[in-house]
Image: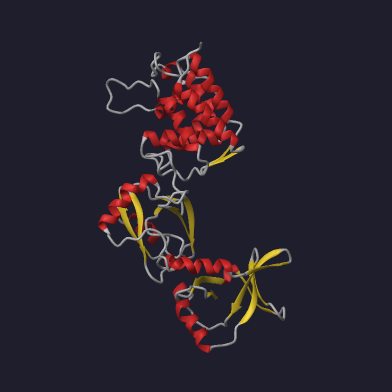
Amino acid sequence: MAPKDPLLGTLKVCVLNLQSDGETVTDTNPHLSSCCELVELVLRKGLQQPVLSLVQRDYWQCFEQLPKQDACGRLAALSLAVDQTRVCRKLLSAQGRGRYLLRLALSRKALPQFVTHLLHTPRVLEWYSPVISILRNEEFVEPFMSLLLVLTHMDFKLDMENCSFLDESWLLPVCDIYEVVPCREVGMVLRYLSGRVFILDLMPGSQAHVDKFTCPGDIIDEINDISLRNSKNGQAGMVLSRLKGCPLAIRVLRWRAQDGTVYRPLIKLLRVLRMENPTLQLGPAPSQQPAAKDQKDSPSQCLKEGRIVYIVQFLGEASIGMSGDKEVLQHAIPQVLQKNLPSKEVLLDLKETHLTCTDRNSKLELFKHHYPEISCVGRYGQPDYTIFAFCVA
């Protein structure tokens, strides 16, 4: 009877589970992290440490050496993946880089090719023990490569930018993009802890508080493609200062995992934040949740010429002078409300190059503005935040 390795048996079960979930695999698949971890264990099994070196050797160093050692001349895909991994600023350790490389290989259906290069490079393969390594055992390496080939028949749609926690875990946090209109201050109170930028609180009336997108306990991972991994105190503020007046795309890592529980790699750090700030409340304030629910329940859209348009109440307009900053809206909106004019139900149509506002009953076009004419957009700082306005030059 042929000998069996328990790692390969477990990996086979995991691959079959991935197959049963369908051809497309995303980061939300419950079997993905287990499958990646098992492949990692196979690549680590029997990997010997150098005698005269203080650096711990991992499988990342093996793949990193292949473009230098393998002379087959067909290493373009591997070299590109290694270079892309090496320059990623969110990865601080060999473990994180190795995991990122594996995810890249799965996304590009290239994992069997990468491992084959490793098997054909004696100067790197000799780092593995011939006694316990799967890669140097002919009876084990063949079924392992067969399982990797099965993975190439699946379509891995992975978010490669969500990689800041690969140094610590195969479990990845929920990641969202917070798009912020140009404003003077976003209004987030931050705390720097273990190289990560936590949101402690949202300033009342600020843009972040109005948008209700971020929550205390969430992490700012990057701003406009500028990574904040391993940030020093004040670094996020410096980035925001440089981007003042510009639209922002903030990548937010949620403290809450996909299943609603606390994201496990954050438990210790959140405990520290709680000890420093006993009043810290994770997640949105309870008073915000019913408001969001009411907004979802109210009909606010309809179809016009095959497009979705928004049904809103037009309250009026006011002159604000020469200033077009977002902050003037907090003074202009009360001016309109004080006139106490009867509201009109209108259709707000956001087209590709401009917007139009049409009276829903009379079909009369009230105004039309091209987007370059609009200097700012914002909501009124009142409890339900349902009134918004924009400033036109």
Q: Nearer the viewer, residue 304 or 77?
A: 304
Vertical side of 91 occupied by 280: above or below: below
Residue 341 drawn at (x, y percent): 57, 88
* Front-lying residue, 133 or 80: 133
**As displayed, is residue 321 above or below residue 231?**
below
Identify the residue at image location x=47%, y=22%.
118
Which residue is at a point 55% across and 37% down the rendered structure image? 107
The residue furthest top is: 1
Q: Along the horizontal axis of the image, is 293 left or right of 124?
A: right
Instruction: Work out which residue is located at the far left of the displayed protein and give it.
Output: 276
- Give percent across and percent down for residue 367: 64, 77
Whole-percent x and y of residue 89? 40, 43
The reply to whether residue 183 is visible in this rendering is: no
The structure residue drawn at horizontal position 53% and vertical position 69%, both measured from the top left corner, is 294
Q: Looking at the picture, does residue 371 appear above or below residue 50?
A: below
Q: Quadrant of residue 129?
A: top left
Quarter of the picture holding the C terminus: bottom right
Residue at image coords 28%, 20%: 51
